Image (spheres, rainbow, N blue to C red):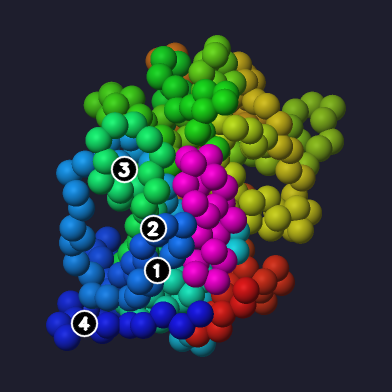
Amino acid sequence: MTIPVDRTANTRIDASAIADGKMTNVPSDHMFIAEYANKEWRKARVQPYRAIPLAPFALGLHYAQAVFEGMKAYRLENSSVAVFRIQSHFQRFNRSLERMEMPPVPEDLFYSAINTFVDADRDWVPPGPESAFYIRPLMFASEERMGLKSSDEFLFIVVGGPFRPLYSKPLRVKVERKYSRAAPGGTGSAKCAGNYAAAMYPTQRAREEGYDQVIWTDAASHTRIEESGTMNVAFIEDKSFVKSQNTEPVIVTPALSDTILDGITRSSVITLARDSGIKVEERSITVSDLQQGLESGTIREVFGIGTAASLAPIGTVSIDGIEHSLSYNENSIVYLLRKRLNDVRYGRSEDLYGWMNEIGVVEV
């Protein structure tokens, strides 16, 4: 579908600062917006980035009917721009909308919104090796109404800007034994705003203790590992140095459930690892398993996986007040996998999986 573009007359772009990685985490010149009312989508357009009017009684402000995605566009080696795994993000966005009793976004509208928005701001997409253009599709209830109900009116918006990785060095994390991110039957597998708000208090308490993030455990017993902060989490188990063991390293990551987000980066890493001959096990891992593995040295690496964080090594894990340290070098599996993923994202290696969707080419 064709989306009209109202280009800004006053660009805020500083091309040299973007190229040098000095202009990051700021909104780009434009935004996409569309309205949903009377069971139809209308007024889809790209316009200059600006505040939007919203009634104080807009239902999304009171009852948290709000869903978002996190995606990235990359500047390829040939200078073209491509979005990473747009179809997977579209599918997850609509799964989250369904869980929050919100209408689906049609596929052609989603693709065209991303494509037209990023194309309008393609000069904001920085070159590699680590920088990217972060894309935030979001949708929330905009109907003005007193009283609890599922909204009949919504706004679908896409914004973005140049972005650098969140973490520049291995993280310090603590295993959270009191607070929970999600419970069975809840919204843990949906990318809804309320999940992130609920995580802020325990995360801030962990930061006050000197940690960057927490490792979430299950709500019922706090004995099973689920996620790390706003990321999926994985462990490299290597028993090859143990006497009588003749094994290869294995990536272990908690199996997906209704309390764990189906991470797009997680899925990509699993695919790359398996195609590289590295065994991957998606299964339950308990806090006790983690503690024993860290104490014996059989767990050699721990890392978070997410859109914003990419692959983030974890250097310190605190379990019940006892800290366990891990060290990394250029041959660590987490760094090798991150390089393989980035080689695809930046067009340095062949895209065997069809993950990169070049801007200006809509494939629905």
**Quarter of the image holding residue 145?**
top left
Label 3 element class: helix
Is residue 311 highlighted in magenta?
no
Please state which amino acid type lies under the numbered disc 1: Arg
Q: Which mark is residue 8?
A: 4
209 sits left or right of 1 in the view: left
How far is the residue under mark 2 from the one under mark 4? 27 Å
Please state which amino acid type lies under the numbered disc 3: Gly
How far is the residue under mark 3 from the one under mark 1? 19 Å
- Sequence-wise, the earlier of marks 2 and 4 is 4
Q: Which mark is residue 60?
A: 3
**Quarter of the image holding residue 237?**
top right
Q: Nearer the viewer, residue 362 or 173?
A: 362
- Quadrant where the C terminus sits is bottom right
Q: Which residue is mark 1?
A: 42
- Sequence-wise, the earlier of marks 2 and 1 is 2
Q: Residue 174 appears at what percent x and percent y?
A: 42, 25
Residue drawn at (63%, 56%) of the image: 268
Q: Nearer the viewer, mark 4 or mark 1?
A: 1
Give the magenta part as a residue range. 90-110
Is residue 103 highlighted in magenta?
yes
Q: Answer whether residue 359 is visible to the viewer in this image.
A: no
